[in-house]
Image: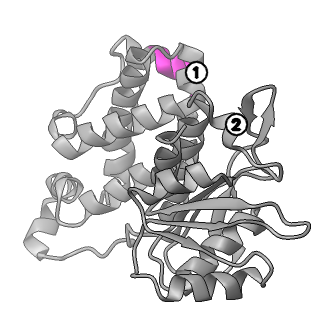
Amino acid sequence: MRFVEEVVVDEFLPTVRSMLAEDLRDRGFTQREVADALGISQSAVSKYAHGDVARHERVVGDERVRELVDRVGEGLATGDLSPVAALVEIEVLIRQLEEGDLLAELHEEAMPALAEADVEFSVHDPDSGLRERERVLGSVRRGLRTLTNASGFAALIPNVGANVAECLDGARTIDDVAAVPGRLVDVKGRAMVPGEPEFGVSEHVATVLLAAREAGSLARGAVNVRYDPAIVETLAESHPTVEFDAERPTRDAIADAVADAEPTDTLVLYQTGAVGIEPIVYVLAPTASEAAAIVRDIV
């Protein structure tokens, strides 16, 4: 008797780890860095590097496995994928391959009686909440890298600070929105990021994003920058632009401003300030990384 989990552990995972170790080494990782990224020992990495771990030819030859290794390797190298996100991506492919696919076929080879039984296996839903959360966090990280690498972005940071945010599909509260804890600030002409993106840490930008979505916007990502008529004019050349009243409660003001606009996933919202309220521009887009790209292009 052999379970499909044994096929995964004995044949699939050693092959994928070996392929990932090779991919990361090709990207310039040291053996220690590869070990840390994959959560394995340096001696295991050494075995992979010297070909001491057998690879399953059918796993190596599967296009989806090769695409996964390339995507996860790139994500770990750039920081777009955390180890948790990488784990989720691999788990999703495993679940897919277990359902009447490669792993199911390998399982049937190990247990010929399964093929005779003509049984379909039910596995976990690959579109899990954890996977979506990790995708959102990855998008926020990419947005942050886009902005911090853009020369001159620091000059666009308002006095209250900037943030990069993205919400889950069906988001209802700020706990469903990922952003930077605290805010990005200008320190001697450079945008400083206080920490890794998290969910539930941005009340300001998250409130604006959620209010816009409640009013009909399809955007899930947002970046805020300082207000300047020239900035608004430049953004308005390519994107729908709406002003809202800073003196009214944010949700009500945005609801009224967005309600008459055509539903879209890209939108520029701005307010020109009031007593004790700094004027701000909010760039909304399908994702945080896309919102950041729009801001980068006006730097």
Q: Nearer the viewer, residue 247 or 86?
A: 247
Corner quadrant of residue 39 = top right
In the image, residue 208 above or below residue 231? below
Q: Is residue 51 left or right of residue 188?
A: left
Q: Is residue 172 visible?
A: no
Residue situated in front as seen by the camera: 153 or 52: 153
Give x and y (percent) for residue 180: 71, 51
The prevailing secondary structure element of the residues shown in magenta is: helix
Q: Secondary structure at mark 1?
A: helix
Residue plotted at (37% across, 10% down) = 50
Q: Earlier in the sequence, mark 1 or mark 2?
A: 1
Horizontal and vertical percent for residue 46?
Answer: 47, 14
The amino acid marked with disc number 1 is Glu
Residue 101, by quadrant, is bottom left
Tell me which segment is drawn in magenta: 40-46
Q: Considering the image in quadrants, where does the C terminus appear?
A: top right
Please report the residue visible at 52 percent of the width from the left and 23 percent of the height from the top: 34
Judge the density around disc 1: few (<14), some (14-19), many (≥20) Cα neighbours within 10 Å: some
Q: Which residue is mark 2?
A: 155
Q: Is residue 120 left or right of residue 282?
A: left
Q: On the picture, is 61 further left or further right than 237?
A: left
Is residue 177 a member of the stretch shown in magenta?
Answer: no
- Name of the residue lying farthest toward the right: 276
Residue 33 marker: 1
Vertical placement of residue 47 versus 208, above or below: above
Q: 236 or 24, which lies in front?
A: 236
In the rendered image, residue 96, in percent from the top left (x then y), is placed at 28, 61
Question: Disc 2 marks which amino acid?
Answer: Ala
- Asked if residue 212 can be seen in this view, the reply is yes
